Image: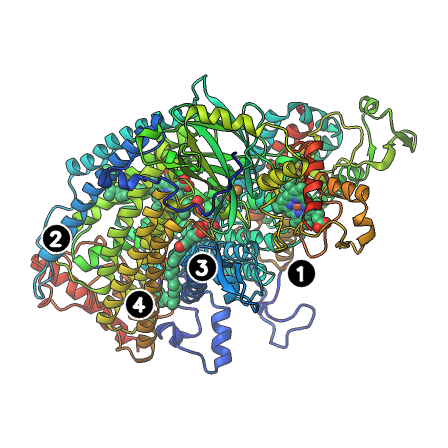
Amino acid sequence: MATIDDRNAGTLGDAAGHGGHHDEHGSYLQPKETLLATIWDWATTVDHKKIGVMYLSAVLMMFFFGGVAALAVRTELLYPVRTVEVQGVDAQGQPTTTTTVTGQWLASFLGVKDANIAQNNQLYNRAFTLHGAIMVFMVIIPSVPAALGNFFLPIMIGAKDVAFPRLNLLSWYIYVTGSIFGIMSILLGGVDTGWTFYTPYSTTTDADQLKVVFMVLAAFILGFSSILTGLNFVVTVHKLRAPGMGWFDMPLFVWALYATSILQVLATPVIGITLLLLTFERIFRVGIFDPGLGGDPVLFQHFFWFYSHPVVYVMILPGMAIINEIIPVHAHKKIFGYRSMAFASLGIAAVSFLVWGHHMFTAEGELAATVFSALTFLVAVPTAVKMFNWVGTLYKGSISMTPPMVYALMFLFLFAIGGLTGLPLATLSTDMHLHDSYFVVAHFHYVMMGGTIIAFVGGLHHWWPKLFGKMYNQRAAIVFALIQFVGFNVTFFTQFILGTRGMPRRYASYIDEFQMLHQISTVGSYMLAVGFTGSLAVFVHSLLAGKKAPQNPWGGLTLEWHIESPPTTHNFHKEPIVHHGPYDFDTVLPPGWDPKDYPVPNAEAQAKAYEQVEHIHIGHQGQH
Amino acid sequence: MSNHVLQSATLADSAHEFMFKREGLGGKSYFTGVTDSDDIYMWIFWLSTVIFIMLMGVMLYWTFKYRRVPGTIAAASSSHNMLLELAWSIIPMGFFAYMFFEGFHGYIGRLAAPPDSIELRLTGRKWNWSAVYPNGAETPEQIVVGAVKVPVFYVPEDRPVKLLMISQDVLHAFWIPDFRTKMDVQPNRYTSYWFKAARLDDGPTKSLPDGTRYRDHFAFCAEYCGDMHSEMAAIIRVVPDAYYGQVISTWNDAVEPVELGRRKWASMCSSCHSSDGTKNTGPTWKGLFGHAVDFTDGTSYTAEQMGNDEFFANYIRESILEPQKKIVAGFGPNMNSFRGQITEPQIAGITAYIKSLK
Amino acid sequence: MTTIPHDSHSPHGHPSPAPERPKTMLWQVYKAAHHFRNKEEEFDGVKLGMWLFLATEVLLFSGLFCAYTIFRIMYPQAFANGSQYLDWRWGGLNTIVLLISSYTMASGIRWVQLQEYGKAKFNLLFTMFCGLVFLIIKFTFEYTPKWSGYFFFLDPALKHHHDSGKTALGGLFHFVEGYGGKRPGELFSYPFSTDPYEHLWWSVYYSATGIHASHVIIGMGFIWWVYRRVCKGVYGPTHYTGVEMSGLYWHLVDLIWIFLFPLLYLIH
Ligand code: HEA
Ligand code: HEA
Ligand code: CUA
Ligand SMILES: [Cu+2]
């Protein structure tokens, strides 16, 4: 059961006529002669790996900004705003009472003098809008697909690059442009519409200013970037799979990203037109969403969620994609129910287009609400299938407690809670209570943060050695993962209780009885900050002083583990030919591994796998 | 008699018994028609808890039991199992179907109000609520919550009350957590739901100064609507039926213009205009009479003009009906027209009230 | 000029200092990008990508069609009134112009494949010209008059709507007193409108046709780009990806108009 074979050597378009021969075989990270040349090289690169790394840095930076905004939100919520009567005596010895307003942290932190409640609230509203918009449009949507997906999807299917490398670079620049628009809107003072831009609020707030338009255009432009990435991946998966790799030989990472890409391509245009109309609405007051002119604000919600519901699966499917890789590799065991996993990804993608109305149970008519509630439960079925399959994979595995595995287990724990709490939201009568409460906030942080972001950070740990060719301190990584885990639950589990008790979301202030829970939650968010700063430190340390990473530190079988760490510019020296499935851990010796460590029972397969890997190794050295 | 303004509502005033406490602490919903929503919630809660614990238990047990021993590999085991996979796709479907039907039931139950309901016409605006009772009365009462005053709406115990809601500007939503129900309040169509407050005997109560028992429930705005979204609350006060009838009829009594104006201010204007000189979303009304104002377009009215009774009355009237015409310097165009929301006598009352704020 | 020196980097017009080499057309030496196995595969890939992109365009417009349907159901009278003011003749003329352009686009591709570069270039230019005609009709005879309150009618049957207006140029221009314009949303300032929601019709009309017009412009840009490349000899019988793709795009732009035309101009 060989993995790579040189039978078709030279069939890839360029091998012969290409100049920089030695470049191709050096690490893609190799700098050019001068710093300027290196920067230019990166800025104009069409190499999917470099583009992936550029996305990665941008996404992490944005995650940091979004996180800072979240901390501002949480800190403001330490104290409710209230009037306090202070008793005192004046110069004449007469008793006095002065009333002051307390609990306005943001205004005093930002140095706004004598802020009244409205001004302080305004700052708060900007903070959470900023947080939501950054996290959704600039972090979580591009996180896995555009960063890790860009890097690994082509390698995993044995391709040299994505189908349209220049388009790939273009979508990176579009992403940057979109982010700049977002930043511009922040520099103009920030917007306070919430990430959902509900009309008529979004069309009337700060009516004389352009910042809302900038933020809306930012989301619009980022949407284009997302469409182009998705389109690129679909074509890549269709056309560039290595010989021997049928649809059902693809790693599940690729399957889930494929489903994601379809969602991106099909859902994003709708938000495009919606945001365009919103811009028209603001600039020309066309009235399509404006009740004052006969338009319908609920129509906006339908349009918005028609995109934004599928988009929550654009967020989670890539997270699941990573878990699909981490669990079998670190449990050294074939994934349970490969086909049902692949179909579940497609199923989720398909059904997710039919459920958008569940965000509007309290706004739409009865019939629509009923239909959407019923359909929503359908989405939960393929998700449940995935959960069971992951846990099933652990059975009789050979499980290493590496940092990626810790993250994967954290994902299962947190995503299960997030998903299960989606159920009372999908149930009509309970959603009438829970809608727009902190219960919803907790639900989506459990799925987005506890699901996708945790999976993303897990994936980063999983592929870090491959990305940069350096190992990191695994023990420290696990410690910080656990801090994140505890901090996360402290932050967000309390919010479920807040929600059921009646705490509405997007509130700068609240009644006193919620204070205790809010304070616990805030403490949790500081723990999260510590945890993530720790992870960052681990990575920085690894870059500066990490040991050189072996080719295959965890024992994976997918193609990226067959090549060097970090990969060469052209990924493969010869076109790989795939002879085994991505998870045949019971029959194939992982490339680069010693059979003494990993005694494959089937001697023949073991020998053959070993020989082939050896072969590649020799081939590689022979060319130098 | 009913003009008392209670200070600072706290937990003790509001009889909060929330879902989570229901099983653990024996609390309950105060909307008598709607315990089914708590039932299905608790049902989902326990089902999820059981599934979650089983799943995590198995996960942790296996990760421990099958931890890697170097020099070995995983024993071969089946990589799929049709029966198992079918089972865990189909069994959840059964659970889901049950959740859907129960949820549907509770939802429809809250929309269709019984024919003998008392109808409260509720208007939401940036950023307060006002309610008109069947006899045309409006509540003059307010209570301090946090840093703002919010209106107190009286409702009788154990009688169905239907809320017919509309918004004057952007979207709002009226949420009464104790009744487990909310509905969006939209500017271009009426929405409604109903509730029946539990009898006062069925839980803790407090007493008004005259000895009448009551129970307070918070109502919050649950759809983001701008700066003071978090201050847009109301109190639903459940009182005995007879007391309810009496109190809303006294609200209808003729009052002095200044008092009428103060009530209107309390229910509609106080979220933006203070009476004590503090600057808020809108300019304070204190000392407005007889003081010069500057406008953003560069024009201004002199102190003499503003001290002229007739000129002042017209200015106030225009500010209420056409607030966008002249924007006071230092403020944004944040006030919406109150045309159709307010009668001429009420405008006169407001004018009188502003004059009284020296 | 359909052939160029092998060294394509030498600036146009300046004789290349390099020694003369035998002239080959660029398409003859075209090789697929290095990560594709061959040209055919690349072509298939690009085509798949293009179809996906067209799907996103259709979805973009479907939002507008949705808005159209919903408002038509909500305010049938407003839509009936508004659509009266669209002259089906202008719309029809534009439809014909676009249909012709689609035909010339298709022939352009065909001629490229047959190496008839002169004809190909003429067809491409003509396609762009049609796009221009479309835009001119749209802007000068439809947008501008409506926006600024005079109406330019070919259809005498519509005149009776404007009895209140003055006329000029032998009755072709109908000015409306006060120069109220048929504009979208709040800008709507036509004083004699009989339905309070007519401005919504115009909102939908201007949004839909405006976004469509911007697509016409983008499409013309694409065609200009391939035209330049045809001049350089990039395309030929074995390599014509770019022409084919901009053709697909142009057909889509045309197709969307085919849907917009009856919805806006014909249904009253
Ligand atoms: C990553 C993103 C993500 C994911 C994956 C999900 C997954 C789900 N979501 Fe969530 N959701 C959001 C992101 C996401 N959501 C966001 C961002 C919002 C708010 C937006 C805003 O308003 O700002 C939101 C809001 C939201 C609402 C609207 C709430 C409201 O505003 O009133 C609803 C209502 O139906 C809902 C439902 C669900 C359901 C049923 C799932 C299901 O897919 C979950 C399925 C998973 C499971 C069920 C758990 C695992 C399964 C098992 C352990 C098996 C056994 C289970 C049983 C047999 C019961 N979500
Ligand atoms: C991906 C999505 C995402 C993520 C990750 C988060 C993360 C967090 N969110 Fe956010 N949140 C949203 C999406 C997200 N949120 C959305 C969509 C809304 C709704 C907005 C709206 O209503 O419009 C919302 C709203 C929201 C609210 C409700 C506000 C309100 O309704 O009034 C709160 C309140 O507690 C909150 C808190 C937090 C906290 C404490 C974190 C923390 O987990 C953040 C922790 C992160 C850090 C502290 C940064 C540290 C990072 C580094 C140091 C870099 C190192 C990186 C590595 C190497 C890994 N969020
Ligand atoms: Cu009103 Cu929020
Ligand atoms: Cu959703």
Residue at the spot of label 4 = A464
Whether label 3 lies within 8 Å of ligand 2 gets the answer no
Measure how far apart labels 3 and 4 are at the Cα level. Answer: 36 Å
Marks 1, 2: nearer the viewer: 2
Residue at the spot of label 1 = C1
Residue drawn 40% across the image and 28% down it: A371
- Residue B125 placed where, x, y %? 58, 39
Measure how far apart labels 4 and 2 are at the Cα level. Answer: 27 Å
User: Given contact means CB atoms under 8 Å apart, are the residues at marks 4 and 2 in contact?
Assistant: no
Identified by mark 1, the residue type is: Met
Marks 3, 4: nearer the viewer: 3
Q: Residue furthest front?
A: A93
Identified by mark 4, the residue type is: Trp
Marks 1, 4: nearer the viewer: 4
**Chain for disc number 4:** A
Number of the label disc, if any, that sits on residue A444 = none
Q: Is residue A383 visible?
A: no
Q: Picture quarter containing residue B249?
A: top right
**Marks 1 & 4 on one chain:** no
